[in-house]
Structures are given as structure tokens and as C-alpha cells.
């Protein structure tokens, strides 16, 4: 555990540096937004393209993997959703809380962190988790909030969801990488070097951006945020572990990557969606802040566990 914690600490130290830069106003909110945009559209997309272009679809997609991850997520999603309804919040708020419980910071934190700690072979399973999170759960929260407000789901909403998926640079970069890989033609050296150089900025840039964005968040509704953080950091990886190792046996290493990905803190894009729809943004903000702070210990514990299991 201590050895893994020592390896994880530099990654979270980068988040801490970003947090200090934002908290002291050395970096403005506009500056944070610019760095985040660079990482999202350029650096991280280049990293994902490079990994995907060197992988086949068979190395990324696995039906037992998808079933295991979705079943583990669904269980915790329904738990968080049900607890929210028991507290008599609105359906839209319940959907946002359930999203916090299962959707982790896979892109900005998971991809650079887990590939660095578990090795390049973790890229395939990690990309599969990222794809499910972005396509399934990012769409689900939009559908749930729309249904709660309008009492129905229109064709227009489905069209908007489809367009948003096609415009997501992470999805596009992975799809282009897999398409290139399917041709059987090696990526030319200069292009590969360019993607490697640009993608190299993804890890420090993403971690710094996470920290800087946390500086603008406040810890309100602590009890609810603590519960959602517990769901995300403890219950979610536990449910995914049972599903991947028992219910839908997944290849051991891929299962370990999936479990580690499930242990990541609440995703930042959940706040963006909550803010956009005006549904409990402070609650989501607090959940991101608390879960990210605690995850330095919980993620280390999960990675230490999978290393010896």
C-alpha cells in the first residue's frame, strides 16, 4: 500500500499544484478554462488516438467486460437514485446524484494515471470504460433530466445526444485511431512522433487542470456529498469487482483495470451537466472536491489490492 501510495502521490501532487494556482488566483478561471480546453481537444485526444491506432477492436471490446461494468454501475446507480428519492428530492436531482455515484474522472485522471501505473496494456480496457461512461451515462443523465422536466423524451433530444457524441473529441480520436488500426497500415513515424509529443502534455496538463478547477468549488451539502463520494470510491469499485470477477468473469488484467477505473473520483463533466441544467451544481461540486481529496488514499488502496490479487 505504501509503495503504491508513493507512486500515486506525484500525480495527486500535480493536482495540488493546480489547486494552489487556482486558489491563489495565480491562474484565473479563464486561464483554467483555456488549459482544460487544450487538454480536452488536443493533448488527450492525441494520446487516445496514439493508443487506439496501435490497438485492434478485439483488444478493446469484450462482451463480458461490457456486461460486468454496466451491471456493477447499474446496481450503484439504482442505489444512489433510490436513496435520493427516499430523501424526497426531485427526479432530476436524483439522476444527478446517481451520475455522481458511477461516473468517474476517467478521461482526465484515469487514462494518464492508470496507464502510467499499470502499463500500456491498460489502454484497451481503460478506453472501453471511457467509451461506456461517455456514451451511456452522459446520455442517460440528459435523458433523465429531460424526461423529469417534460414528462417525455422527444426525437429532438435523441438527435442532440447523437450529435454531441459525434462531436466529442475523445470519441472521435478513439474512432479514428481504431479505423487507422483496422487498415493494418502502421502509423507513419512523423505522425506517431507528433501524436506522442502532443499527447505527452495530456498527463501534466489534465492533472493541473483538475486541481485548478477544484479551486473554484465549494463544499456545501457535506452529508450528501460524503455519501455520494462513498458510493463512488467504495461501493462502485466493489460492485464492479463482484461483477467482473464473479458474475461475468473477465480476463484478470482487464478486470483489474476496470476495478481501478471504477475507483476514480466523481467526474468533472457531471458538474458541467448539472450547471448547464441548473440541477444541484453545488452538491456535485462538493462531491467532486471531497471524492478527489479522499481518492489519493482509496485509489492507492484499490491499486495495491489488485496488484496482489
Image: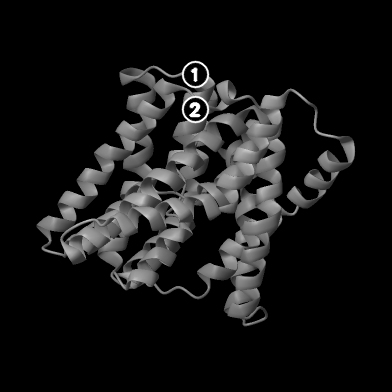
Marks 2/1 in contact by CB < 8 Å: the verdict is yes
Secondary structure found at label 2: helix
> Pointer 1: residues within 10 angstroms few (<14), some, or many (20+)?
few
Using residue 28 as the reference point, say whether residue 168 is left or right of it. Answer: left
The tally of labels here is 2
Q: Which residue is located at x 64 percent, y 51 percent? A: 11
Location of mark 2 (residue): 256
Using residue 278 as the reference point, say whether residue 54 is left or right of it. Answer: right
Quarter location, residue 152: bottom left
Residue 226 in the image, given as x and y percentages of width and height: 31, 59
Residue 299 in the image, given as x and y percentages of width and height: 49, 43
Q: Nearer the viewer, residue 48 or 228?
A: 48
Q: Which mark is residue 252?
A: 1
Kindly tell me whether residue 226 is visible in this rendering. Answer: yes
Q: Is residue 35 above or below residue 27?
A: above
> Pointer 2: residues within 10 angstroms few (<14), some, or many (20+)?
many
Amino acid at each position: 500500500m505504501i509503495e503504491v501510495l508513493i507512486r500515486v502521490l506525484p500525480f495527486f501532487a500535480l493536482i495540488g499544484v493546480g489547486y494552489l494556482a487556482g486558489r491563489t488566483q495565480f491562474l484565473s478561471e479563464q486561464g483554467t478554462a483555456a488549459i482544460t480546453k487544450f487538454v480536452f481537444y488536443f493533448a488527450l485526444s492525441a494520446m487516445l488516438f496514439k493508443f487506439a491506432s496501435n490497438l485492434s477492436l478485439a483488444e478493446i471490446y469484450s462482451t463480458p467486460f461490457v456486461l460486468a461494468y454496466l451491471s456493477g454501475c447499474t446496481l450503484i446507480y439504482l442505489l444512489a437514485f433510490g436513496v435520493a428519492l427516499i430523501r424526497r428530492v426531485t427526479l432530476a436531482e436524483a439522476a444527478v446524484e446517481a451520475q455522481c455515484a458511477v461516473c468517474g474522472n476517467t478521461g482526465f485522471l484515469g487514462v494518464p494515471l492508470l496507464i502510467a501505473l499499470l502499463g500500456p496494456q491498460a489502454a484497451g480496457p481503460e478506453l472501453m470504460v471511457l467509451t461506456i461512461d461517455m456514451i451511456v451515462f452522459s446520455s442517460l443523465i440528459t435523458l433523465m433530466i429531460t424526461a423529469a422536466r417534460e414528462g417525455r423524451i422527444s426525437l429532438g433530444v435523441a438527435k442532440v445526444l447523437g450529435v454531441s457524441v459525434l462531436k466529442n473529441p475523445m470519441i472521435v480520436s478513439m474512432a479514428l485511431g481504431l479505423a487507422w488500426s483496422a487498415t493494418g497500415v502502421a502509423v507513419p513515424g512523423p505522425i506517431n512522433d507528433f501524436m506522442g509529443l502532443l499527447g505527452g502534455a495530456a498527463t501534466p496538463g489534465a492533472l493541473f487542470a483538475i486541481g485548478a478547477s477544484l479551486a473554484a468549488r465549494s463544499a456545501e451539502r457535506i452529508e450528501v456529498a460524503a455519501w455520494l463520494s462513498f458510493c463512488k470510491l467504495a461501493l462502485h469499485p466493489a460492485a464492479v469487482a463482484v461483477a467482473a470477477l464473479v458474475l461475468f468473469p473477465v480476463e484478470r488484467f482487464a478486470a483489474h483495470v476496470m476495478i481501478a477505473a471504477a475507483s476514480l473520483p466523481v467526474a468533472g463533466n457531471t458538474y458541467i451537466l448539472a450547471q448547464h441544467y441548473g440541477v444541484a451544481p453545488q452538491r456535485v461540486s462538493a462531491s467532486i472536491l471531497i471524492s478527489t481529496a479522499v481518492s489519493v488514499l482509496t485509489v492507492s488502496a484499490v491499486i495495491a489490492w489488485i496488484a496482489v490479487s
